Image (tube, rainbow, N blue to C red):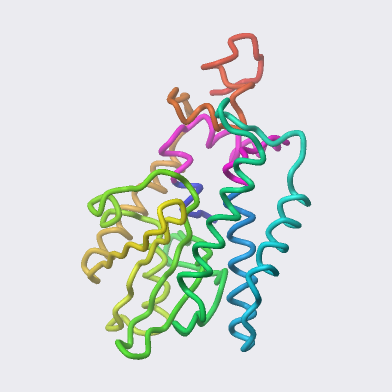
Amino acid sequence: MYSHSKLSTFEQCSLKYKYKYVDKIKVLGKSVEALLGFAVHDVLEYLYTQVKNNKIPELDEIIMIYSNTWKDNYNENIVIVKDDLTEKDYFNKGVQFLIDYYMKHKPFTDNTLETEKRINIVLDKLNNINLIGYIDRLVHNKEKDEYEIHDYKTSNSMPSQQELDQDRQLALYSIAIKEAFGHDKPVILVWHYLAHGIKVTSSRTNSQLLDLKNQTIELIKKIESTTIFPHNKSILCNWCEYKTMCSAWNTEYKYKNH
């Protein structure tokens, strides 16, 4: 079964893909940025689950849950790449993200249908090529009769509108939503860039989604026919959990990488 992150890993570095998905090597260390993303997503899922049950948690409760989630998941193996930042700096970022989001969106009346919605996209039924994904939050805008796929971003990077209009992840998710609710239903892709306090949107035509489906099938076929997995050395290596065993950085490491 494929996912957007699995496809992106192959595109980023095929050796990392091999370590993670072919050899299934488990590693302890993950980045503090990954922890930040996990903790914030976990709290926002809780928030909207409560809203669906006609309860709006107080902001203090939200921050307390975030703090507990952080403490429960932070450990000595968490990697902090940036020398000028500490664990406390990242923790405080999450607090500010949640405060800003809460104050901006309360009382959360946009008609959320589901959080962390699991979807399955059938790309090629004949060859059994499927893709799995999880939507952070699915909304039905009753006034416009549109479905909205919401995604939370905790990174500092802010893509251009052109990059968002070419984004694969949420566009693929919209295929599943159209399958469920009707191909004629508009689906809006929504990103919340929490570090900037900005919400940005995009959409795709059915023709564009068909093209994307075909492109994704071709990428998966390429992955499945790959037998040699070279590394792709880049700045992203600093956040890679396999860096210490990668031949691009550790020539003495004896693990067979291709």
Q: Residue at x 30, y 55 (%)?
A: 164
Q: Main secondary structure of the magenta part?
A: helix
Q: Nearer the viewer, residue 189 or 50?
A: 50
Q: Residue at x 61, y 29 (%)?
A: 242
Q: Residue at x 61, y 73 (%)?
A: 47
Q: Is residue 64 left or right of residue 214?
A: right
The correct choice, above or below, for 257 with respect to 172 in the image is above
Figure quadrant of the N terminus: bottom right
The residue range painted magenta reads 8-35
The correct choice, above or below, for 41 with respect to 50 in the image is above
Q: Position of residue 123 (x, y in %)?
A: 40, 63
The correct choice, above or below, for 3 with respect to 89 in the image is below
Q: Residue at x 42, y 61 (%)?
A: 192
Q: Nearer the viewer, residue 149 or 246?
A: 149
Find residue 235 and report its image quarter.
top left
Q: Position of residue 186 (x, y in %)?
A: 29, 79
Q: Nearer the viewer, residue 114 or 215?
A: 114
Figure quadrant of the C terminus: top right
The correct choice, above or below, for 174 with respect to 230 in the image is below
Q: Residue furthest top?
A: 252
